[in-house]
Image: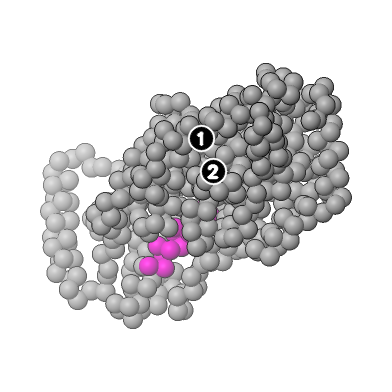
Amino acid sequence: MVKLLITMSYVLASISVVGQINAPKPPIPGTFQPKSPSQSYAPSTSSNYQPKNNPANKINQQQNNNSKQAMGYSTPVTPDNVKTNFYKNPLTAKKEQSEIDKILVELDQMKVRDKRIHFNTPSFSSIYPETKNYYSAYDELLNMANGKSPINIGKAAFLVENAFDENKGSYEEFDKMLNHIVLFCKQYMIHNGYDTTSNLAKNMMLFRFFSDTLELNGKNHFPITYDFDDYMGYKDWRKMFITKLLNTNSGQCHSMPLLYKALAQRMGAEAYISFSPKHTYIQFREGNKFYNLELTNGMLITEDLIFESGFIKTETIRSGIYMDTLSNQQTVAYMIQDLAQGYGIKFGNDGFVIEALNKSMEYFPNSIHGMMLKSNYYTGLLNQYLYEIETRYKEKPNPQQLKEKYPIVYETYLQRNAMYDMIDNTGYEPISTQQYEAWLKSIGEEKNRQEHLKEKEQLFNIMKIKKD
């Protein structure tokens, strides 16, 4: 957010998503025609309007509310709330309730022969006791996000990872490892004449810890390498973890920037997590200029090089999904999204996932990572409903039929389309794995490496020390 406010006009004039995110794949169930992510959704107004004093209208609302509560539905942030007028005349209200009760009895009798489904998505907490680890981690993360407890980026990352590992890890040991790195960096700065109060010097020290071979008191530290094997975590979600990075000295564009941010906070350095298409990197500020640290290959890179991916447009800058700087609060919200994603991978999606995502978006509303996860959630839920309808009743309803016969399913359909619209409006375009890997490889080209060395030397000149 800091970067967006300072450089918005400059970036838009100079143009010549969190770690790595995959675009949702909408279902095509039979004759049902879903909306593709590239389309725009225009909500229609129902022509079958019912007056508010119609008992059937209240029955539908009551049934919908019951079904929503059973499936873990939570009201989205953006839609307007529906205002209901209540009768003030007790006799009228009593008569109306009597009519409602009669109709409800008839509806119960019709359920045997009616093709209506009582939709419900069970909570996995009743199946997997390990889900309690996620609920406790969520509570701690939420307290950081809402200010009830101090923000600790390292601990936030540990909570997310340890929930997936069923609380088998030790935060004390994790904390010691981070503090040991901080101590090494501080001692190295003192030994080599770095200004330990300078934000630039702190960031250059951390950058060198990730990218250079360093020697201190007869001991060598070797640079952190990029792990090309399963860097998306498709086979093993733990590949995304800081704990994995610390144990192997190798990581990828999710774990490396997150570790950097955690260490920067402990060193009192100002540094920010930022996103580009399918990628995460670090920014820090020196004076009025922001510098971009590409940790996967240990280089300082220019904004022009980030734009060269071809998937950053004016709209993506304006919406803040790319190249903006995350505050500490937004970083914790990003961790909540990681928590929800890990839960879905480990157990499956239920009410916990959408609750966590909705809450995280309150603190980080322009998160493309959160938007994608919510889109995937509603797409998967709609798939499940349509499969159930087709399997049980051999029906392949179109949207209008969903609206008439399956209001809860239709509501999910609208929620999914709303998320597609939100993503469309950011200017987001999907980037393939091949395109991403080609862009990542291009960063290491000789011309870019020479630019990196030049900029690195300039920063050391600003620090007024000679690079050892």
What is the number of the mark on residue 165?
A: none
Does label 2 or label 1 sit earlier along the sequence?
Answer: 1
Residue 234 position within the rendered picture, expressed as x and y whole percent measured from the top left: 52, 61
Q: Which residues are magenta?
A: 371-384
Q: Is residue 449 above or below residue 202?
A: below
Residue at x-position 42% and y-position 68% = 383
What is the number of the mark on residue 246?
A: 2
- Inspect the magenta stretch and tell me whether residue 102 lies in it: no
As shown in the figure, which amino acid type bears the numbered disc 2? Leu
Write down the quadrant of residue 193 in the picture: top right
Write down the quadrant of residue 347 in the picture: bottom left
Task: Tell whether label 1 touches label 2 (CB within 8 Å).
Answer: yes
Residue at x-position 46% and y-position 79% = 31
- Label 2 element class: helix
Q: Is residue 179 visible?
A: yes
Q: Which residue is mark 1?
A: 177
Q: Crowdedness of circle 2 by 10 Å Cα count: few (<14), some, many (20+)?
A: some
Between residues 218 and 40, which one lies in front from this camera angle?
218
Q: Crowdedness of circle 1 by 10 Å Cα count: few (<14), some, many (20+)?
A: some
Between residues 440 and 446, which one lies in front from this camera angle?
446
Q: Main secondary structure of the magenta part?
A: helix
74 sits left or right of 459 in the view = left
As shown in the figure, which amino acid type bears the numbered disc 1? Met
In the image, farthest residue toward the front? 218
Estimate the spatial distance between the alpha carbons at disc 2 and disc 1, rounded to whole Å.
8 Å
Q: Is residue 263 above or below residue 187?
A: below
Q: Is residue 22 visible?
A: no
Write down the quadrant of residue 282 in the picture: top right
Residue at x-position 26% and y-position 51% = 129
Q: Is residue 144 above or below residue 82?
A: above
Residue at x-position 53% and y-position 66% = 25
Residue 100 position within the rendered picture, expressed as x and y whole percent measured from the top left: 17, 56
